[in-house]
Amino acid sequence: MWTALFGREIRDMRSYLAAHGVASPLNFVHASPDDITWLASSSRRIEYPLDVPPNAVGCGPIYMALEPLATQDPGLLAWLRRGPTVLIVLGSHIMYDARDTAEMVRAIRTVLAADERVQVLWKFRPEDRDGDGSNDAFLSDEIVSLRATGRVRIERWLAADPAALLESGHIVCYVHHGGANSFSEAIG
């Protein structure tokens, strides 16, 4: 919360807005001065019911890939072209402990058993219990056996942005943590 209210990025944004004539930039108490039109990366159809000031214009979600997947990660695009793909990305900060890993492996096996054409791309960041970065979760029997199917690709980090993956046309299901960015990516 401190970073969201007072971090470097928010300070820089406030300075920029103030330099461009916004008298009270990013004032969370009075967030919508009447003399400024605000563009909201949302729309009334997808939000919780709420009062929206007349000078706030819903224009979203607007979300596009920075570059096509073919440019960002051609090898991943080639892999995606092999079949319909379930993309699992539960956020940048999610780390899987042993129990969560076992549950996700079980869910992935269920998906693979249901349709032999489907493959899974899973962004998997294992918990680093020792704090030394040497986590051996990628070598566990469950992870090794999933990879051995040839239908599961497990990555610590995805080089391509999620919008590029979704725009590729090969993702048939996007499993995400429900945050605003993931939601916007999914319907953008």
Image (cartoon, rainbow, N blue to C red):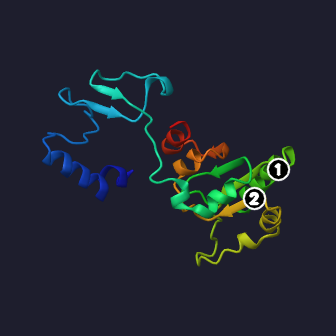
The one of 83 and 93 positioned closer to us in this rendering: 83
Residue 22 appears left or right of 46: left
Q: Quadrant of residue 39?
A: top left
Residue at position x 59%, y 57% from top? 94
Q: Mark 1–mark 2 contact, CB under 8 Å? A: yes
Q: Position of residue 172 (x, y in %)?
A: 68, 42
Give the residue number, with chain letter if any, for mark 2.
152
Q: In terms of secondary structure, where does tag 1 sit?
A: helix
Q: Quadrant of residue 115?
A: top right
Q: Is residue 22 left or right of residue 82?
A: left
Task: Reply above or below: 122 against 188.
Answer: below
**Residue 36 circle label:** none
- Earlier-in-chain disc, 1 versus 2: 1
The residue beneath circle 1 is 112
At a point 81% along the width and 64% down the height, the residue shown is 142
The spot of residue 5 in percent (x, y) is 32, 49
Residue in the foreground of this view, choosing between 136 and 64: 64
- Residue type at mark 2? Val
Q: CA distance from mark 1 to mark 2?
A: 9 Å
Amino acid, disc 1:
Leu
Q: Residues within 10 Å of mark 1 (few under 14, many from 20)?
A: some
Q: Residue at x 37, y 21 (%)?
A: 51
